[in-house]
Structures are given as structure tokens and as C-alpha cells.
Image: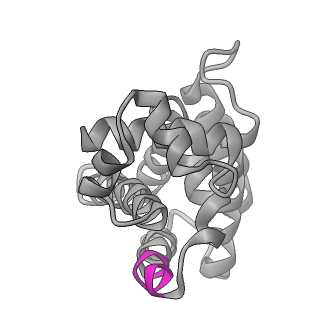
């Protein structure tokens, strides 16, 4: 039931926004009482925090798996991360929207747990850029933090416009983005 509440809430928050979605809206949409909701979550904000943690933890797990593959070059790892972020739009698009759009509705206490994880995702990309610089795949004079922010800006905004069921696949978009990024940073 907790999963059902969470999944329906993600869809409602995506459609209506966190502030405009009431607990009553959530329970009515799945045919349960508020008591059922409060059995699993103490508040709507706790539910939002749960959604945020699930999303960023999943992203970090996927990123760690990519970065841990020693058979891949820095360029290949960069492509894999970009593709992972884009393919995630199909599997977790609504969660991505909620993550980026509704973070402002989290308490300072909740943000103190989410922001370090979000920052770690970015720092892992910075580290990948640094490794690529050191092994000669990327130009040595790059500003790795700015490059990492640029990569995340390009990919994270894609949930606003990319249609995974459209005429171009997530792999094709990842190839275009990666080529665009690499042509600016490879030797």
C-alpha cells in the first residue's frame, strides 16, 4: 500500500503540483482513508521526502555502477551517465519532475539530507572529468565544476521537453548531447 500511495502521489504531484495536491486527493485517487495514508506517512512532506530520497538514491546507485566499470573510458562513462539520465525520463519522468520542481517544498531538515546527495552526483561527474583530463581524453585546462554543471543543465532540463516515445530515442539524444559536450572538451 505504501508503494501504491507513493506512485499515485508522484503522478498527482506531477500533474497538479505538491502544494495543490491534498492528502484527500491522494487517498481519494486510490480509494483509501486518510488513516491509511497516516499509517505510512506522518505528513505530505514526509511523502515528498520519501519520493526525493528514492529518486536521488536510485540515480546515485546507477551512477556508481557506471563509474565503477573499469573497462570503460572516461568518454564512455560520460556517455553512459548522459544516457542513464535521459532513459530515466521514460522510467521515472514524473519522479524527476517532482524532484526538480518540488524541492522547494521540503523543510530545511529534509534538504540537509537531499542536497548532499544531489551534490555528490555532480561531484562524481566532476571527478570523471578530472580523470579524463589526467588520462588525456579531455583537455587539461577545463574547469571541471563548470563542465559538470553544464552537463547536468543539459540533461536535467530534458525532462521538460524530451518524449521518450517520440521520433528520437534516448540513446540518440544521449549521442547528440555527448558529442556536443565532447567536441568542446576532447583533445
Asked whether residue 3 is in view, the answer is yes
Res. 173 image quadrant: top right
Asked whether residue 82 is in view, the answer is no
Q: Is residue 158 above or below residue 45?
A: above
Q: Which residues are magenta?
A: 109-115
Q: Position of residue 139 (x, y in %)?
A: 63, 71
Does the segment drawn in magenta span residue 148?
no
Q: Position of residue 137 (x, y in %)?
A: 51, 62
Q: Is residue 112 above or below residue 136?
A: below
* Rendering colour mode: one colour
Res. 6 image quadrant: top left
Say which quadrant the N terminus sits in: top left
Q: Is residue 180 left or right of residue 41?
A: right
Predominant SS along the magenta part: helix
Res. 127 image quadrant: bottom left
Q: Position of residue 84 (x, y in %)?
A: 45, 42
Q: Position of residue 79 (x, y in %)?
A: 50, 46
Residue nearer the viewer, 153 or 80:
153
Q: Is residue 126 above or below residue 101?
A: below
Q: Residue at x 50, y 80 (%)?
A: 111
Q: Is residue 136 left or right of residue 64?
A: right
Q: Residue at x 60, y 45 (%)?
A: 13
Residue nearer the viewer, 164 or 134:
164
Amino acid at each position: 500500500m505504501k508503494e501504491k500511495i507513493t506512485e499515485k502521489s508522484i503522478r498527482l504531484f506531477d500533474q497538479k503540483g505538491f502544494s495543490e495536491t491534498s492528502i484527500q486527493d491522494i487517498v481519494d485517487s486510490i480509494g483509501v482513508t486518510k488513516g491509511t495514508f497516516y499509517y505510512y506517512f506522518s505528513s505530505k512532506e514526509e511523502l515528498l521526502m520519501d519520493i526525493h530520497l528514492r529518486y536521488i538514491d536510485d540515480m546515485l546507485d546507477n551512477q556508481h555502477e557506471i563509474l565503477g566499470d573499469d573497462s570503460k573510458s572516461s568518454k564512455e562513462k560520460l556517455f553512459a551517465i548522459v544516457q542513464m539520465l535521459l532513459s530515466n525520463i521514460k522510467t521515472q519522468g514524473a519522479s524527476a519532475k517532482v524532484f526538480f520542481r518540488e524541492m522547494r517544498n521540503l523543510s530545511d531538515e529534509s534538504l540537509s539530507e537531499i542536497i548532499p546527495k544531489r551534490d555528490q552526483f555532480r561531484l562524481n561527474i566532476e571527478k570523471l572529468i578530472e580523470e579524463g583530463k589526467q588520462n588525456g581524453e579531455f583537455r587539461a585546462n577545463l574547469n571541471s565544476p563548470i563542465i559538470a554543471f553544464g552537463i547536468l543543465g543539459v540533461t536535467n532540463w530534458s525532462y521538460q521537453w524530451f518524449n521518450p516515445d517520440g521520433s528520437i530515442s534516448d540513446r540518440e539524444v544521449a549521442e547528440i548531447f555527448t558529442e556536443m559536450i565532447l567536441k568542446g572538451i576532447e583533445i
